[in-house]
Amino acid sequence: MKYVLPLLLSSGLVFGAFAQDQAQSLPESELVIVTDDAETTITVELADDPDELATGLMYRDGIAADRGMLFDFGDPREANMYMRNVSFGLDMLFLDEDGEVLAIAQHVQPYSERLINPGIPVKGVLELAAGQVKAFAIEPGDMVQHPMFNSDVSEDIIDLDVVEPESDTSDIDVTDE
């Protein structure tokens, strides 16, 4: 019996370490990339806690052309991205609080430990399959719309509790006749 507790504890430690070496499935949402030429909607996974930010797209076989991973750093900070345990090339967009593309890294080498950093604080990074920056014609100054940015795609939704009528509508009959 005295060996059971150490065995269980060591098994838990091994399992805990093993679990961090696995691909993570993260919450998904839509994101819109707005360029001079088009608006492109893709599905992204959102990484926003320390483990998700550290793991990202590690341990996966690839990423589809219509998908991405969005890293939300919360407050803007210098991003030090790398490709440890990522077996496929990526394009990276470095984004400000409004979702504006500040810098781009294209065809980042798989498995590279080299830090990719635009040298300025960013709110987030969008990782796409290698070649998608060119395919979507993305350039610095273009916009990414997602709820994590001030340029939320839901801005066009009208909140009826807040909107004041432009004229007096008290005399409008809305009954069915």
Image (spheres, grey):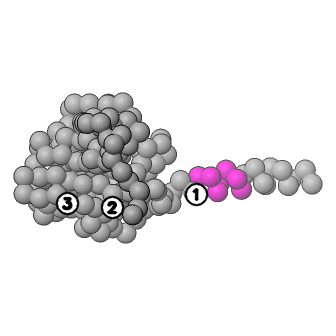
The answer to which quarter of the image holds residue 96 is: top left
Q: Nearer the viewer, mark 3 or mark 1?
A: 3
Please provide percent x and percent y for residue 44: 35, 57
* Left or right: 171 in relation to 18: left
Measured from the top left, where is residue 110 in percent x and y? 28, 59
Query: Does the image show residue 115?
Result: no
**Which disc is residue 40 wearing?**
3
Mark 2 highlights which residue? 43
Q: Residue at x 37, y 69 (%)?
A: 61
Q: Of the residues shown, which amino acid type is indicated by label 2?
A: Thr
Query: Could you say where residue 56 lies in the image, as x and y percent from the top left?
Result: 40, 52
Residue interval drawn in magenta:
11-17
Residue at the front extreme? 177
CA separation, marks 3 and 1?
Answer: 37 Å
Residue shown at the point (29%, 44%) measured from the top left: 155
Residue in front for this viewpoint, 13 or 148: 148
Residue type pointed to by label 3: Thr
Identify which amino acid the numbered label 1 is placed on: Phe
- Residue shown at the point (58%, 57%) measured from the top left: 18
The N terminus sits in image quarter: bottom right
3 or 1: tag closer to the N-terminus: 1
Residue underneath mark 1: 18
Asked where in the image residue 114 lies, by quadrant, the reply is top left
Camera-side residue of 151 and 158? 158
Say what secondary structure mark 2 lies in.
strand
Q: Earlier in the sequence, mark 1 or mark 2?
A: 1
Q: Nearer the viewer, residue 152 or 29?
A: 152
Tags 1 and 2 touching, CB below 8 Å: no
For the stretch drawn in magenta, the main secondary structure is helix
Q: Relative to 149, does residue 92 appear above or below in the rendering?
A: below
